[in-house]
Amino acid sequence: MDKGFSSEWIEKLKANNDIVTVASKYITLNKKGKTWWACCPFHFEKTPSFAINEFEQFYHCFGCNASGDVINFVQKFESLDFYDACVKLAEYAGMEVPEFHSDENLVKLKKKRERVYELLVDTARYYYNNLKTKDATPALEYLAKRKLDMNIIKEFGIGYSLGWNEVVTYLKSKGYSAEEMIDAGVAEKRNDGTLYDTYGKRLIFPIFNLYGNVVGFSGRVLEKTDFAKYKNTPQTIVFDKSKCIYGIMQLKKLKQKENIKEVVIVEGQMDVISLAKCGINNAVACMGTALTINHAKDLKRFADKVILCFDGDSAGKKATLRSIEILVNAGMNVYVVTIPNDHDPDEYVNMYGKDKWNELMDNALYWVEFLIKDFAKQYNLEKLEEKNKFISDALNVIRRLSTQAEQEIYLKMVQELSNISISVLKGDLNKSVDNEFKQEDIKSKSEDKLVLKENAFVKAVKFVLSALLHKKEYAKLNDDFRDNLLNSDYVKIYDYIKTENENGRVPIISKLFDMFDVEGSKDIFDIVNYVFVDGEDNEKYFDDCITLVVKTGITIQKDKLLSKLSTIKDLDERKQVMIELQKLIIKEKNK
């Protein structure tokens, strides 16, 4: 990964900044055995679960799963980007910072982004201060009607746009250009070339990112109009609605004070604000878009449990189903709440209060139960054909559960709803389970990189690479294994380990934080933080995993060539593919 500095300088920077020494500047560490322990600085906890491996030079929290090297630690603790974290560490080590050799356009983009942040915070303060003027009566009346006091208004930075030109005039007086206002999404051009306020005469909700920066706004009209009720910032260099979460800054503040048991996802800003007004501070909302994997990754920092609380209309139902898929795939414990009488969270909490809301959350349905009951509502179970469809849909959900105990619980639920015996349901469930590696388990992402589902093959790859990286005595390099990894990231890790060994060096786990976005990749994260189970025959398992990966890889490559062969008409090209195929067949026979 090109991060703007040479890999040699970054290695020297890390070598001169021992992670234990640096972390000690921020937190209190205690050594037990070979590991240094502390209460995690990234989430609230009473019992230390934040561990630093001094030899491997990386940290891992067993509570919130935060993981990284010394640069990543400073980035997170100080809320800095990569460049500024490196500058901070260079200061600690008394090192000169070389020229940031990243593409000149990227350097310009960084400066432009910083300027946009400055403009946005000035704009947010301007809108907020407008509430103190005599012309803010419509906004104040609306806020009073929603029973929002000044404490909650200040907490969320709510403001008001007085008209169509005022903010433009103000920002010009602060030295901002028309281009900068447009780049930040706060102004747009009229046909005559003059600028006007993007959120003219609207109530303003600033949108903050995880680090407390204003990245955009959402404006709400206060009177009947032909315009849309809400208007959000368009895509800018700092605002991407597929990544922004409304209320995440408040969630971060809460995490620093106490342990968050669960995060609640609601539909709109007023839901988040009304809940916060009632003392419920663990709610967030997506910015007028479907939940994405980026949202899921950010939310997982705060809690493993998430409760979906969308409106009961068809749009809300679709959003719930989409969100379940994404959150479950991100490894979160997902629950669903359906609010009675089609109320939204804002209405419900204002009508019934905090205690009733908490009661509603306590009775949230686990996603599997929710889906099974939802399927049962969709089908007429008195009709044989529809009952079969219900069973098929329900078993497809149950099949995703990782333990037989969990499967048993929900098979009983399906039995009660369908009156089909458990033994028959188990038979149908097992009949469809195929532990072999299938072609559909692979999705091509690029020519050299394949995204693989978490199956026996992927688990085997992770174990072998983890054992090699963590320097287990039974772990030996095997080039047949390397030739069948099917994913360029896996190959890159293997090649790094092999190169270090061939040059008489020891592979260091923290090096992977230079090579990859570890926290952004579940596969790499799992390899870095692999938990080996004592007492198991790991040496035999290692050999079995090598065998599985090689056989599976050969099969997949062979199938790919056979598929390719069926489409090739050129005789010379067919001959070449046949030769490659023959080599694989011979390899397969020898395994």
Image: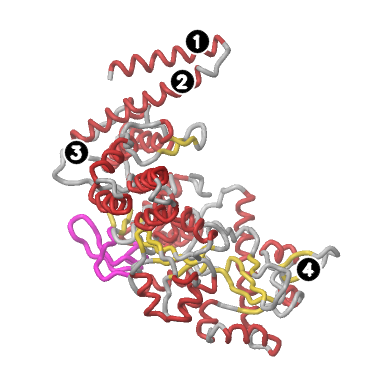
**Residue farthest to the bottom, as pictured:** 134
Residue 8 position, x and y percent, is: 44, 45
Nearer-N-terminus badge (2/3): 3
**Drawn side of residue 370 relative to residue 506, left or right:** right
Residue kind at label 4, given as amino acid type? Leu
Eye-nearest disc, 4 or 2: 2
Q: Nearer the viewer, residue 322 or 279?
A: 322
Nearer-N-terminus badge (1/3): 3
**Drawn side of residue 542 relative to residue 449, left or right:** left
Eye-nearest disc, 1 or 3: 1
Q: Which residue is mark 2?
A: 561
Residue kind at label 3, given as amino acid type? Asn
Q: Which residue is mark 1?
A: 575
Question: What label sits on residue 538 in the rendered view?
Answer: 3
At 65% from the left and 70% from the top, the residue drawn is 229
Find numbered disc 3 in the image and state the secondary structure of the residue it sits on.
Answer: helix
Q: Nearer the viewer, residue 437 or 133?
A: 437
Residue 100 position, x and y percent, is: 55, 52
Nearer-N-terminus badge (3/4): 4
Q: Which residues are magenta?
A: 22-51
Q: Estimate the spatial distance between the alpha carbons at disc 4 and disc 1, rounded to whole Å.
A: 66 Å
